[in-house]
Image: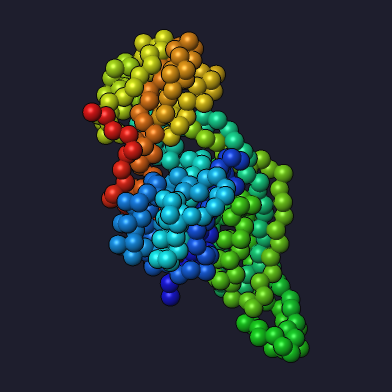
């Protein structure tokens, strides 16, 4: 049976929750319906006339982009204008549209981690902290002979992570009692008869943002007609989220060497460079997309350079005055990695959830800026 848009979003957002997004952003489902069936997903950096043509030709049911197609509130929807015409084509072809923007920039394993990985940076940390995710404790009671099955479902849904450790849980054996009513359809026992069952109490931890997904998977795996569970809010400090990354090169490079490194790993014809004071680059800050606003933060955190895109004249002037190397690799060039990243992430998530959906990447993505 085909999955729905809701199913796809629920699975994807366990990795890149919309709660991670910046306040000013516009992420999530922008066109379509959550109950629409999805057999094929089309991934693109932007929704353009070219990528929409390709998605329609390839019979996509859901388009997932990085940049939101609808960013500012629409005052009208005119089909004789480009934006209105494209929305009309989406609806006419029964294609939903979803945007994963700054939530994908901030998410662990997201765009900035991917960029840091391409540059082969080590000892990665956050460039700018944006939030701390609230944590909850999940306690569920499971018949002993189904404990592993339910535990696996809970952990695979994203619960049980503490720092660099996964599948963290505490298991306590005990006895559970219940008395089914005449209307019940019990997995164990008979109506109007008090039952005692060997059960396991499982305690684990989860981010608040994935609660619904974890509970859904838990209930699907649980054999009881009514699973007994508790959720407790925790005062433990949750995982710190942030935009941009800081990392170290394994071997320091001269600025000119680092430029060649950037050209190689990002497949660039050129790099715009504002020279800084350091003769060697070791501690690197990176913020994909338009990230010149992070110059001061990069300086305060001791970065030798900041790698980003969309650098304006006065941004470069500010970096020069502060003595930090500024490398502008281009907005498109720093984010086109969104497509292969999403293909890989979605494939892994769907395999884990045992969902069969075709996922294809755009081949018609065009950089609107060219250099002659």
Extreme left residue here? Answer: 372
Q: Position of residue 329 (x, y in %)?
A: 35, 28
Q: For residue 249, what is the image quadrant?
A: top left
Q: Determine whether 300 is above or below 142 in the image.
A: above
Question: Disc count in the image?
Answer: 0
Q: Which residue is at 43% across, 41% downward?
A: 111
Q: Which residue is at 44% across, 60% downward?
A: 88
Q: Which residue is at 69% across, 88% downward?
A: 190
Q: Determine whether 174 is above or below 82 in the image.
A: below
**Closer to the camera, 57 or 179?**
57
Q: Position of residue 220 (x, y in %)?
A: 56, 71
**Closer to the camera, 257 or 201?**
257
**Rendered-image quadrant of the C terminus:** top left
Residue 278 placement, left or right of 208: left
**Closer to the camera, 37 or 212?**
37
**Rendered-image quadrant of the N terminus:** bottom left
Q: For residue 274, what is the image quadrant?
A: top left
Q: Which residue is at 35% across, 51% downward?
A: 49
Q: Determine whether 182 is above or below 122 in the image.
A: below
Q: Position of residue 236 (x, y in %)?
A: 68, 43
**Does the image show residue 271?**
yes
Q: Position of residue 60 (x, y in %)?
A: 36, 63
Residue 322 placement, left or right of 173: left
| Colour mapping | rainbow
**Does the image show residue 108?**
no
């Amino acid at each position: 049976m085909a999955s729905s848009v809701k199913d796809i979003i629920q699975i994807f957002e366990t990795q890149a929750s919309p709660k991670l997004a910046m306040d000013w952003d516009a992420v999530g489902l922008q066109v379509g319906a959550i109950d629409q069936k999805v057999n094929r997903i089309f991934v693109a950096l932007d929704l353009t006339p070219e990528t929409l043509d390709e998605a329609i030709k390839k019979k996509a049911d859901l388009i997932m982009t990085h940049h939101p197609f609808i960013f500012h509130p629409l005052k009208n929807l005119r089909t004789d204008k480009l934006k209105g015409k494209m929305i009309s084509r989406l609806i006419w072809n029964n294609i939903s549209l979803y945007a994963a923007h700054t939530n994908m920039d901030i998410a662990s394993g997201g765009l900035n981690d991917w960029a840091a990985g391409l540059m082969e940076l080590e000892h990665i940390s956050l460039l700018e902290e944006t939030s701390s995710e609230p944590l909850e404790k999940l306690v569920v009671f499971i018949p002993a002979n189904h404990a592993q099955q339910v535990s696996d479902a809970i952990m695979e849904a994203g619960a049980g992570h503490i720092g660099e450790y996964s599948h963290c849980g505490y298991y306590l054996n005990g006895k559970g009692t219940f008395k089914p009513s005449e209307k019940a359809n019990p997995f164990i026992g008979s109506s109007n008869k008090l039952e005692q069952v060997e059960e396991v109490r499982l305690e684990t931890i989860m981010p608040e943002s994935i609660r619904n997904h974890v509970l859904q998977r838990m209930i699907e795996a649980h054999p009881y007609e009514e699973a007994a569970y508790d959720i407790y809010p925790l005062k433990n400090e949750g995982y710190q989220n942030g935009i941009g990354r800081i990392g170290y090169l394994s071997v320091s490079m001269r600025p000119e060497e680092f430029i060649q490194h950037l050209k190689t790993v990002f497949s660039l014809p050129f790099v715009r460079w504002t020279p800084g004071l350091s003769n060697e680059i070791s501690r690197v800050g990176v913020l994909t997309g338009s990230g010149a606003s992070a110059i001061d933060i990069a300086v305060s955190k001791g970065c030798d350079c900041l790698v980003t895109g969309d650098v304006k004249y006065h941004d470069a002037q500010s970096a020069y005055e502060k003595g930090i190397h500024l490398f502008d690799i281009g907005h498109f060039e720093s984010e086109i990695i969104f497509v292969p990243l999403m293909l890989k992430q979605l494939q892994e998530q769907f395999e884990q959830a045992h969902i069969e959906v075709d996922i294809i990447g755009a081949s018609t993505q065009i950089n609107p800026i060219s250099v002659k």
